[in-house]
Image: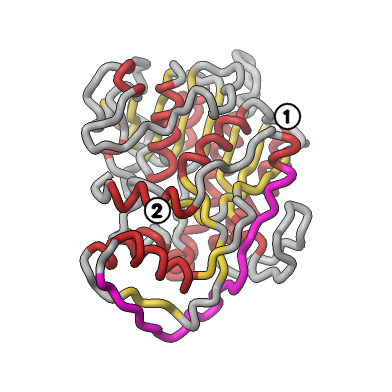
Amino acid sequence: MVAVAAGKQGATVAGGGRHARRKTDYKRKSEKGVEPVHDAQAEPTVGRPVTFLVTGGAGFIGSHLVDALLAAGRRVMVLDNLSVGKRDNVPEQAQLIEGDVGDEALLRRLMDEVDGCFHLAALSSTVLSHQRWLYSHRTNVGGTVTVLECARATAQRPAVPVVYASSAAVYGDNPDAPLAEQAKLQPFSAYGADKLGSELHARVAGVVHGVPTVGLRLFNVFGPRQDPHSPYSGVISHFLLRAQQGEVLSIHGDGAQVRDFVHVRDAVRFLLAAMAHAQPTGQVYNVCTGQPTAILALAHLIIHLSGKGSGLQHSAARVGDIRVSIGDPDLAAQRLGIRTTMTLREGLREMVASPAA
């Protein structure tokens, strides 16, 4: 384990809390019956780096990524302030540093220890990004700029490649579905604006400072460990909880809103593939299936798979709710050599079978 001194914001180092077992146990199911995300046959080869920093690694997507990196034999350092992420999501084989992604002194020390950085730390709730606009901006854009600044080359090491999470929110309510990467970017949420700002700063990091990056525009990611009680979680986790409790599912508006749902296992595969393609050109790719699903159809499917007698009720439409959000997966397929493999039905069936995962 690499010792990390306390930063100016009081960072602490701790062991992870989940999966108290040897590394070889990642090839088996956990006590909760959920397969680890690593798939030796399907998962792309991670690039040259052998030690990785994962910001937001105690969160939903980040913890699955940490699992996959450990299963591939990588050394992993997790930076998370645990405001959203959970200590128990981090395996004990990973080094957990409890600290803030905006702590420049801490980030500089960590970057000197790693060969690559996956930057996932963010305030990802659209609603909260409006309620806490300035805080959201400081976390999302300020955190990204801090990561990129600290990834710059020093006299002791080359620039550290950074793969960062962007979002489909950068497209806004764009009717030109499926949305390819060159589509018009017109975010109208603070969260979407922050993610677009992060993409622009990543381009600056490459052009001006030579930092290799890849940005991934994540569409609607779902899967195990998504906390249905959290305002950061998506519609699927909320629907599943209510359906499994036999409660009515509430749909905002007419339910004709269309989304592109991506299983977290596939999202992790994209992250791993992207690290090997990081370049100073700052390319961005969609992480999507290209398959549309209406929210009303999703609700009916979840009720069917759960086998519970839940009903549906419609509430007022949310202001600014995007009607259609479907991605075009072709560019990532061509350049990263990867497409999604898990269908929505398969992913939901897995979650229904293991609700506590």
Colour basis? secondary structure
In magenta, the rendered stretch is 309-331
Say if 202 sits above or below 128 in the image. Answer: above
Instruction: Using the rendered image of the protein, determine whether residue 14 is visible from the camera's viewpoint.
Output: no
Q: Residues within 10 Å of mark 2 (few under 14, many from 20)?
A: many
Q: Residues within 10 Å of mark 1 (few under 14, many from 20)?
A: many
Give the residue pinned by disc 1.
210
- Identify residue type, mark 1: Gly
Q: Position of residue 247 (x, y in %)?
A: 24, 73
Give the residue pinned by disc 2.
348
Q: Position of residue 274 (x, y in %)?
A: 63, 33
In depth, the one of 213 and 27 nearer the eye is 27
Judged by its main secondary structure, the magenta piece is loop
Q: Quadrant of the N terminus?
A: top left
Residue drawn at the location 57% of the way across and 58% of the way down: 260
- Label annotation for residue 195: none
Say if 292 sits above or below 213 in the image. Answer: below
- Does the magenta-highlighted stretch encompass residue 44? no
Q: Secondary structure at mark 2?
A: helix
The label nearer to you, 1 versus 2, is 2
Q: Earlier in the sequence, mark 1 or mark 2?
A: 1
Horizontal arrangement in the rendering, residue 266 relative to residue 214 (left or right)? left
Q: Quadrant of the C terminus?
A: top left
Residue drawn at the location 68% of the way across and 48% of the way down: 329
Q: Secondary structure at mark 1?
A: loop
